[in-house]
Amino acid sequence: MNNRTASVAEPIARLIEEFHKLPGIGPKSAQRLTYFLVRMPSEEAKALCEAILAVKEKLIYCSICQNISETDPCAICNNDKRDHSKICVVENPLDIMALERTGEYTGLYHVLHGVISPMDGIGPEELKIKELLTRLKDDSVKEVILATNPNLEGEATAMYLQKLITPQGILTTRLARGLPFGSELEYADDVTLSRAFEGRQEIDKS
Amino acid sequence: MNNRTASVAEPIARLIEEFHKLPGIGPKSAQRLTYFLVRMPSEEAKALCEAILAVKEKLIYCSICQNISETDPCAICNNDKRDHSKICVVENPLDIMALERTGEYTGLYHVLHGVISPMDGIGPEELKIKELLTRLKDDSVKEVILATNPNLEGEATAMYLQKLITPQGILTTRLARGLPFGSELEYADDVTLSRAFEGRQEIDKS
């Protein structure tokens, strides 16, 4: 009999392993989460399970913007008060959450579900680009905001999309690059700093 | 209709909230975990839920050592090959896992399920100390290793237990304090460094 494995009950070992599969959860966090759950009241553990299963059972993809939603079309695409002449293209649904939190943008979205990344074998056909181009056939769209991440893959994807969209006479824009709020010049990287220089703006005198 | 809340499907918002309740999971991690689960195959999500529920349904506390176990007595208390004359007292079941990984110790354990912490209103009666003393009535126990954490509460708890146990003619020991393996003297704190000095040992000439 192996003392080492015998010391951990099988359900504990299994839950630690399951937690460890999740992103950003190392072996130590998996252990801590498992023991937290052991001590948690049963109802709370059940509530967590129900929430997990609800996400798998109730969610679908919006056939227009490809965002995760309970309804098709989703609440954003279906909202007449939003500006249907603008489409903001993002990599994944989390980006929509971040943008919605700002309360700045009232247009529609389109989720690519990834970026072009030859290293990972992801080409344009793996992304929801065809669906985006279908939406643009409708003359109502006047501006496409390419809000992919400001990194290599995100820039490459934005370039690729811009070349497809601009010839259709639709304005394509990209989110401003520059110094993030609360940052310090001293610690800014070279690319960020040169982009901030290039994009400098006259101070509003009003 | 509120655009901001409408943009996040209810099951998503609920799962983010449930994950956020777990220790060490902030709002960003909760979002990332949620979207990971959305894209996870249904069977894997179900496996996670089953593992969570199994932990709640199948685990009990060993009536001897108070560790979490599937059986009573647990696999360690029930193992005749282990040294039943030693009891290592720990704060929680995770400590047993850590000690078992070393493969150094072959005795039994006792889980206090906490430490004495007047600040948090935890006195000796909240811990499994009565159960420990009951075990010591049996003359077979020769050594109690007090392996509570080397911090204020852990030290106080060890002192408290030592005062109860030593008069019974049982050897009480404490894990060695000193510099952790792989650490650098330069960065060691004062207490650790002075403990390492006090506990210095002659180099084995063999």
Image (cartoon, coloured by chain):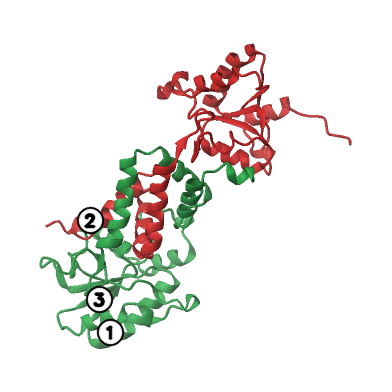
Chain colours: A red, B green
Q: Quadrant of residue B75?
A: bottom left
Q: Kindly identify the amino acid type of the residue bearing the numbered disc 3.
A: Val
Provide the residue designation for mark 2: A10
Q: Position of residue A103 (x, y in %)?
A: 67, 42
Mark 2 or 1: the one toward you: 2
| Residue lying at 35% horizontally and 47% vertically, measured from the top left | A20
For the residues labelled 2 and 3, the Cα–Cα distance comes to 28 Å
Q: Position of residue A76 (x, y in %)?
A: 59, 36
Provide the residue designation for mark 1: B166
- Badge 3: residue crowd in 10 Å (few <14, some 14–19, many ≥20): many
**In-image side of B14 versus B68 (left or right):** right
Q: Label 1 is found on which chain of the structure? A: B
Q: How many marks?
A: 3
| Residue B112 appears in the rendering | yes
| Residue lying at 38% horizontally and 70% vertically, measured from the top left | B198
Q: Label 3 is found on which chain of the structure? A: B
**In-image side of A166 versus B170 (left or right):** right
Q: Kindly identify the amino acid type of the residue bearing the numbered disc 2.
A: Glu
**Residue B59, numbered label:** none
In the rendered image of this protein, does residue B80 appear above or below residue A186? below
**In-image side of B77 versus A38 (left or right):** left
| Residue lying at 59% horizontally and 35% vertically, measured from the top left | A78
Provide the residue designation for mark 3: B144
